[in-house]
Image (cartoon, helix red, strand yellow):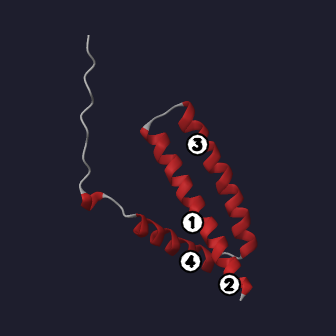
Amino acid sequence: MRRRAKPRRNIPRAWRVEPSARQQAIDVAARALLVSHDPATLRTLAGHLRSVCDEADRVAQETPSPPALETYRRAARSLAEAERALALADVEMAR
C-alpha cells in the first residue's frame, strides 16, 4: 500500500508574525518587567523561568501534544522576556 502525503496547509501572510514584531513584543514586555522589578529579582525570576522552560520542554518531548507545545512556547517566551529585561537592566547599570 502506498502512503498518502499529508496536505500542506498554507498559512495566510496576515496570520504570520514577523520576527521584528515578535522581538518588539518581547522588548515591550521586558521593559514592563524592568519597571516593576529590580535586577536581583529579575535574576531570580529568570532562573525560575529557565527551570520552568526546561520542565515544559521535557514534558513536551515525553508526551508530545498541542497543549504541551503551547506550555513550552509560553514558558520560552516568558524566559526570553526576563532575559531581555536583564540585558536592559545591565545596559542601564553601565550608564
Tell me which numbered mark, 2 or 4, is placed earlier along the sequence: 4
Q: In the figure, residue 40 lies in which quadrant? A: bottom right
Report the residue at 32% width, 58% height from top.
Answer: 16
Circle nearer the N terminus (3, 2): 3
Residue under label 2? 92
The answer to which image quadrant residue 38 occupies is bottom right
* Residue at screen point 63% across, 43% down: 55
Mark nearer the viewer, 2 or 4: 2
Badge 3 is on which residue?
57
- Which label belongs to residue 31? 4
Q: Is mark 4 on a helix, strand or loop?
A: helix
Which residue type carries mark 1? Glu
Q: Distance between the residues labelled 4 and 3?
A: 26 Å
Furthest-right residue in this view: 40
Vertical placement of residue 27 versus 13, above or below: below
User: Alpha-carbon distance for marks 2 and 4?
Assistant: 12 Å
- Few, some or many C-alpha atoms within 10 Å of disc 3 (few <14, some 14-19, many ≥20)? many
**Residue type for callout 4:** Arg
**Tag 1–tag 4 contact (CB < 8 Å):** no
- The label number, if any, that marks residue 81 in the structure image: 1
Q: Give whichever of discs 1 and 2 has the lower sequence position.
A: 1
> How far, Cα to Cα, is label 3 from label 1?
17 Å
Q: What element carries label 2?
A: helix
Tell me the quarter of the picture where residue 84 sits.
bottom right
Q: Distance between the residues labelled 1 and 4?
A: 9 Å
Report whether 93 appears left or right of 26: right
Q: Is residue 18 left or right of residue 3?
A: right
Q: In the visual, does 70 lie left or right of 34?
A: left
* Residue type pointed to by label 2: Glu
